[in-house]
Image: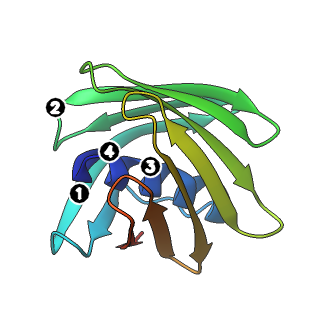
């Protein structure tokens, strides 16, 4: 998945796992903050990405979410395991899977598309 999508997924997974209310994520690969606005209410996620100038929204329950990017970048699935502070998913457009974990405010995401670890801070 591309860098902007990875940052969005890391932000959403980090927020769902930690409950930390923040509207930015630091992308350590790109050495910059990515600013976002939106809401996490019940099983609905609505986020505006200032980087993409577009929305990502999602629905889910019991830790299973389907996310959709409104700029045509496709969607992905996201499964959250609160007990393990971990997540897994699949990007539909690329067909690649990803997984990661969260410790405090640090999100680690492994993307099978580029076979690398990526790091973010909420």
Position of residue 17 measured from the top left corner of the image (x, y, whole percent):
66, 60
Residue placed under numbered mark 1 in the picture? 34
On screen, 118 above or below 112?
below
On screen, 111 above or below 101?
above
Q: Pointer 1: residues within 10 angstroms few (<14), some, or many (20+)?
A: many
Residue at mark 4 to residue at mark 2: CA–CA distance: 13 Å
Q: Earlier in the sequence, mark 4 or mark 2?
A: 4
Residue at mark 2 to residue at mark 1: CA–CA distance: 12 Å
Residue at mark 2 to residue at mark 3: CA–CA distance: 16 Å
Question: Closer to the camera: disc 3 or disc 1?
Answer: 3
- Contact, mark 3 vs mark 1 (Cβ under 8 Å): no
Residue placed under numbered mark 3 in the picture? 9
In the displayed structure image, the side of residue 57 where residue 59 appears, left or right: right
- Contact, mark 4 vs mark 3 (Cβ under 8 Å): yes
Q: Residue at x 32, y 44 (%)?
A: 5
Question: Closer to the camera: disc 1 or disc 4?
Answer: 4
- Contact, mark 4 vs mark 2 (Cβ under 8 Å): no
Position of residue 74 measured from the top left corner of the image (x, y, whole percent):
36, 24
Residue placed under numbered mark 2 in the picture? 53
Secondary structure beneath label 1? strand
Q: Residue at x 47, y 65 (%)?
A: 110
Which of 86/105 is in front? Answer: 86
In the displayed structure image, the side of residue 27 where residue 101 appears, left or right: right
Q: Earlier in the sequence, mark 2 or mark 1?
A: 1
Q: Earlier in the sequence, mark 1 or mark 4?
A: 4
Residue at mark 3 to residue at mark 1: CA–CA distance: 12 Å
Secondary structure beneath label 3? helix
Residue at mark 4 to residue at mark 3: CA–CA distance: 6 Å
Residue placed under numbered mark 4 in the picture? 5
């Amino acid at each position: 998945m591309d860098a902007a999508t990875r940052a969005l997924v890391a932000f959403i997974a980090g927020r769902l796992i930690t409950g930390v209310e923040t509207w930015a994520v630091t992308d350590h690969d790109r050495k910059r903050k990515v600013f976002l606005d939106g809401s996490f209410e019940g099983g609905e996620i609505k986020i505006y990405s200032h980087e993409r100038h577009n929305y990502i929204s999602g629905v889910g329950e019991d830790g299973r979410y389907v996310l959709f990017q409104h700029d045509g970048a496709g969607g992905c699935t996201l499964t959250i395991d609160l007990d393990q502070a971990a997540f897994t998913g699949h990007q539909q457009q690329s067909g690649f899977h990803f997984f990661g974990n969260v410790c405090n405010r640090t999100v680690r995401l492994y993307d099978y598309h580029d076979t690398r670890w990526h790091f973010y801070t909420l």
